[in-house]
Amino acid sequence: MPVYESDSDADTPPGKLFSRTRSIHEVLGGGPVADILLWRNRNVSAALLAGTTLIWFLFEVVEYNFVTLLCHISITAMLVTFIWHKAAEIFNWEAPQIPQFRFTFDYVASTFHGRFNQLMSNLIDIASGRDFRQFILAITVLYVLSVIGSCFSFLNLLYLGLFCMETLPFLYDRFEEEVDTLVGRMAREIRRLYRRFDAHFLNKIPRGPVKEKKTR
């Protein structure tokens, strides 16, 4: 029986996706971000998905300008606050207590800086050619992303990425066994097709004789 028709792969039990040894929660960082992406904090996950969908709808469908939207939100908030204060004075209600929002820009900047440095370090390590398979895979993924990016606007591409981040990890965590089994079957079929292609075509390509080096 030919090598490419071997059934040895069929007896191999399906492994984890990307040959990982950790859980999907640990792969995503194991912190609050992983809880949000896996919908373990449903309120925050739903609010984040609804907020990004609303922003995408306003800018892409309604075609709101960012400055116009920001001004309209500010006008609405100021009018609501003004009416609330005046109504409290007239009807002797308790004045509204507006909470103070403090944005932790230092934390966000440091987190982004660390992730960006890690990404650049990984790209430089891959570009060094230590692992040729990772190098080809990275080039292929970047090319596919460039083709996809040319078909969508930046906002649509950003929303699509956020939507996938909010849904795909959750779906994989819920149907992990089914996905691993399906991916394992696809990987075995790809290996079988490659063996067949190698046996029928690549091995039949004539190769020149290897010249022996003359030793003095």
Image (cartoon, rainbow, N blue to C red):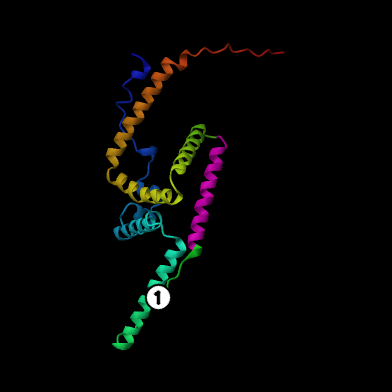
Which residue reaches farthest right?
216
- Residue that badge 1 annotates: 78
Say which residue appears at 40% left-offset and 51% top-offset.
Answer: 159
Q: Quadrant of the C terminus?
A: top right
Kind of residue indicated by mark 1 = Met
Percent across and percent down for residue 81 are: 37, 78
Which of the two residues, 45 or 15, is positioned nearer the viewer here?
A: 45
Secondary structure state at the residue bearing disc 1: helix
Percent across and percent down for residue 113 are: 52, 55
Determine which quarter of the picture holds residue 3.
top left
Percent across and percent down for residue 162 are: 39, 51
Which of the two residues, 4 or 19, is positioned nearer the viewer here?
A: 4
Determine which quarter of the picture holds residue 89.
bottom left
Magenta region, main secondary structure? helix
* One can see residue 96 in this view: no
Point out the stretch of residues depicted in magenta: 107-129
Percent across and percent down for residue 144 are: 45, 38
